[in-house]
Image: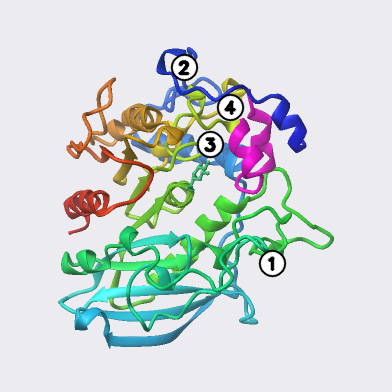
Amino acid sequence: LGVSGVRAQEPAMNYDESRVPAYTLPDPLTMSDGRRVADAEGWMSERRPELLALFESQIYGKAPGRPEGVHFEVLSEDRYALSNMATRKEIAVYFTDDEEHFMTLLLYVPNKRTDAVPVFLGLNFKGNHTICDDPLVTPSTLRTEPGKGPSEGFPRAAAASRWPVEMLIANGYGLATVYRGDIDPDYDDGFQNGVHPLFYRDGQTRPAPDEWGTIAAWAWGLSRAMDYLETDEDVDAGRVAVIGHSRLGKAALWAGAVDTRFALVVSNDSGCGGAALARRRYAETVARINRLFPHWFCDNYKRYAGNEDALPVDQHELIALIAPRPVYIASAAGDKWADVKGEFLAGVHATPVYELFGSEGLYGTELPPADEPCMSGRIGYHVRSGGHDITLYDWRQFVKFADNYLK
Ligand code: GTR
């Protein structure tokens, strides 16, 4: 579908809970051929691969695996970062042999450690130098749409409120981050300037309808960051949590679904195409997201614009793909655009899969009160008061939840 075709099918935005249409969610425990999944083994060997392939071909697009040429170079290391509390490293993750294409991973690990540490890994929106007030972080090269970003790039520490590095370090966690633009700039350029062209077959000029969009590319980048973390002695690669806010929360969920090396997954305000159920058509819809961000998903996803009931999956099954690994879904009360209740219900409806593994998930039919996190099961949830953002409050809950599994 072209842009005008998508727009023609786009219904008015709904913010009224009473106007959420009746819908039937696909059952995560029923195979496409009607067979029931009986146990964890059947989930892992049959249903999980089936669902993963559907999400891949219909929503995010298939990504290549790890290219042979991937290799790493520690560009800098400083044991006296953050008032001597942390060691900072900057690592080039080269995507190919030729070292022309790479992303820069910024990593902090606590100096007070007796062993390899658990790490939170997440992409950042504005550049590695924006996550905290550390004067020695190499500024990322801004890669926004020509004419759209600030000409000087974003100032140092511009996003510091979203990255409580000192709090994580004090709690024994490392933090690793990459600028999203290093992997694929976030605008529609026909997939010419990110990682996609590195994988085009002869004569190919853009991804096929079932091949990766930008969100899958970001998720792929998170896996390449994990490739590095597996080699770093200061990091316990068995205890890496992948995290993201908003569009980068969509990427974190997809990375966690695809790549089982991630021990824990955190989605913050990920909304449509993230944790929120598509069939609720509440606020942002499949039609709208594909019109505004035609590069995020694979082209096949556009077929479900205004046609959500035809989707062979819904987002509760994305959460279920993470099972039995712990996942935390965070919403914000004022973030109606992300469909708070749809995010909560995705966790609730993923729960039967967690139960197959003998774990608890998330329960209820109504949203829990604001600022009262649910952490009794392996699907954590909270709705924070306030708007679309990731705050110190959110991170404190993620740390508390992670302490149950990664400590
Ligand atoms: C919005 C988009 C959301 C969410 C958000 C963000 O414009 O509609 O799906 O991803 O951007 O990333 O902040």
Residue 115 forms part of the magenta stretch: no
Whichever of callouts 1 and 4 sits on the residue coming sooner in the sequence is 1
Amino acid identity at mark 1: Leu
Whichever of callouts 3 and 1 sits on the residue coming sooner in the sequence is 3
Q: What element carries label 1?
A: helix
Give the residue at mark 4: 311
Q: How far apart are marks 3 and 2 (CA)?
A: 29 Å
Question: Label 4 neighbourhood size at 10 Å, few (<14), some (14-19), many (20+)?
Answer: some
Question: Label 2 neighbourhood size at 10 Å, few (<14), some (14-19), many (20+)?
Answer: some
Residue 274 seen in the figure: yes
Note whether ligand 1 is within 8 Å of mark 2: no
Rendering quarter of residue 403? bottom left
Residue 292 forms part of the magenta stretch: yes
* Marks 3,1: beta carbons within 8 A: no
Give the residue at mark 1: 198
Whichever of callouts 2 and 1 sits on the residue coming sooner in the sequence is 2
Give the residue at mark 3: 50
Left or right: 49 in relation to 157: right
Amino acid identity at mark 2: Val
Q: What element carries label 4?
A: loop
Closer mark to the observer between disc 3 and disc 2:
2
Closer mark to the observer between disc 2 and disc 1:
2
Give the residue at mark 2: 20
Whichever of callouts 3 and 2 sits on the residue coming sooner in the sequence is 2
Left or right: 72 in relation to 54: left
